[in-house]
Image (cartoon, rainbow, N blue to C red):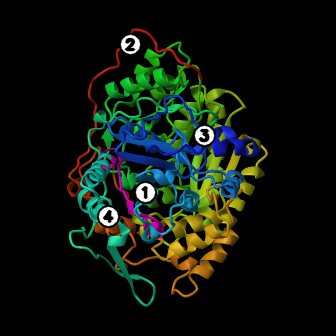
Amino acid sequence: MGAESVFARLEPLLPLVRKPIQYVGGELNSVVKDWDAAEVRWALMYPDAYEVGIPNQGVQILYEVLNERPGVLAERTYSVWPDLEHLMREHGVPQFTLEAHRPVRDFDVFGISFATELGYTNLLTALDLAGIPLAAADRGEGDPIVLAGGHAAFNPEPIAEFLDGAVLGDGEQAVLAITEVIRGWKREGRPGGRDGLLLRLATGAGVYVPRFYDVDYLPDGRIRRVAPNRPGVPHTVAKHTVMDLDNWAYPRRPLVPVHESVHERFSVEIFRGCTRGCRFCQAGMITRPVRERSITTIGDMVEQGVTASGFAEVGLLSLSSADHSEINEIAKGLADRYEGANLGLSLPSTRVDAFNVTLANELARGGRRSGLTFAPEGGTERMRKVINKMVTEDDLIRTVTTAYASGWRQVKLYFMCGLPTETDEDVAAIADLAKKVIKAGREASGRRDIRCTVSIGAFVPKPHTPFQWAAQEAHETVDTRLRSLGAALRSDPGYGRAVGYRYHDGRPSIIEGLLSRGDRRVAKVIKAAWTDGARFDGWSEHFSFDRWERCTAAALANEPVDLDWYTTREREYSEVLPWDHLDAGLDRDWLWQDWEDARDTSGAREVDDCRWTPCYDCGVCPAMGTEIQTGPSGATLLPLPTVPARAGG
């Protein structure tokens, strides 16, 4: 029997909310499959608003991978704004999917992709609206299996109470393995019930199932140990790594939003992973090794994606896109192919020391110059050595000079505040650096309308990085430094108007820090904050530090830990960290040595990129059975017989 659409009940509510079109569905390239013909049904969620969630690459890729398979169905759902949440509760409308407006609770799997920990409360809203018990222990045979994935699921312990499982790493092959386990379990008559299925997922599909692990604590609040409580369950759960990305050339038919979203472009992931070794960067650490897509595969993906979507811009994505071994050839080949087609090319993430004149010219040939963002991260050479960001001031000036001389009028520079060993002077130096950038731009272009935007956020230590042991800086210190930097940027009449300043205050970062390095006891805090009204915590207009601070104090009142214990406390090597049983492939001793190298009082020691140097034993390749996959291949992009027509911009 097919799941009933709730649209008839939803439609009368839509005129009463803002941006109602985001709940209608029907996007170009969306897929509606026969419910009764599917053996396994997935509801995929990005736990944020539609405009933020629909461009998400992870969800789009899994959506396509699953829907290509016979007998498998995947639909999407996003977080509803509080105005619609209120009406849905009042009128009994459950959390629904966009494709066919089916209740999320009717699916076999509810999969949530977390890019940030600040989406955790939105998970609780979705579960509650769906009629799925918040606690995994309270769910029955009629409830879907709730799985988390994404970068913020590499420490799922703070939300372990709410999850049936978590998938670490790449999802393409993992979701297919999970699907086959569920299909087999169903065909066999569901042996063992829900618990039997979870045991199969834990032992046969590489899924971390929190209920199969017990956590013991020491009297002072630290973890004594984490141990399996079922035979056959692994002591550590390893991440999934997809090799040979040319075999996984997704998305082929990108979803085109029905109203504005944060990224209006077709995005192609040109490589995955990063070995630059920035010590603060969780994404770079957990996605190793580097795996490049070939220039020909990238060309094919652009051709198919632009034809299928009509987007007027192509984003060449990775953690550091200009590091691709054939980036100049890719940019030139695509610019040649689409000359005159008014198709823009962009590199949303660009290393200061990888940008060059050739790349700048090819990116500009499409007739449009999207913004360039560079990330020095630290304001001084000393600070950049601490974080292993091997970029000198000369590198930065040379790079922005190239950009300004090539026709760009504005660049954005991204920094962090509150990094380990940081001083007031390290942050103040950012103002001098911005002025030097403007001066270099004016000289290179001969113009006065040069702009530079300084964007700065508070640093949050993350699991599976060398800084996982670091004390987070108090938000009062961060805010004082940010205010001083703003005053310094505005103080010079010759440069003040040419430099924009955007910053994120330190208080949200403290809560992000609590959620990113928390253990299972933090679930009580999350539930208390959600009950108190926490929603969309990644949006400044919805975030309340006072609420989180109050709920943390109340929820942990009977525990030997508090907000500062989780955030501003430095950890020792011997401490068992909440995620130590979750294996990203990184050797723990190597991470600790890198942490000590960062703090070396005689001068922080830098680590080279193993793409171009001998292996430095981070542990990923031998632990995961993987290897670095890079070019150059020597191939070229041939001209297309005809430039693909685009449906619109």
The numbered mark, 4 or 3, whose residue comes first in the sequence reads: 4
CA separation in Å, label 1 and label 2 = 48 Å
User: Which numbered mark, 1 or 4, is in the foreground of this view?
Assistant: 4
Q: Which mark is residue 262?
A: 3
The quarter of the picture where the C terminus appears is top right
Q: Are marks 1 and 3 in contact (CB under 8 Å)?
A: no
Image position, residue 216 (x, y; %) = 37, 83
Comparing 405 with 45, the one in front is: 45
Q: Residues within 10 Å of mark 2 (few under 14, many from 20)?
A: few
The amino acid sitting under disc 3 is Val
Vertical relation: 445 (above or below) 149: above
Q: Is residue 82 magenta-colored?
A: no
Image position, residue 210 (x, y; %) = 37, 69
CA separation in Å, label 3 and label 2 = 31 Å
User: Which numbered mark, 1 or 3, is in the foreground of this view?
Assistant: 1
Location of mark 2 (residue): 639
Image position, residue 492 (x, y; %) = 76, 48
Magenta stretch: give its range.
156-175
CA separation in Å, label 4 and label 3 = 42 Å
Location of mark 4 (residue): 193
Could you say whether the residue bearing mark 2 is in a helix, strand or loop? loop
Location of mark 1 (residue): 144
Q: Is residue 171 magenta-colored?
A: yes
Rendered image quadrant of residue 53: top right
The amino acid sitting under disc 4 is Gly
The amino acid sitting under disc 2 is Pro
Residue 351 visible in the current orientation: no
Could you say whether the residue bearing mark 1 is in a helix, strand or loop? loop
Vertical relation: 424 (above or below) 225: above
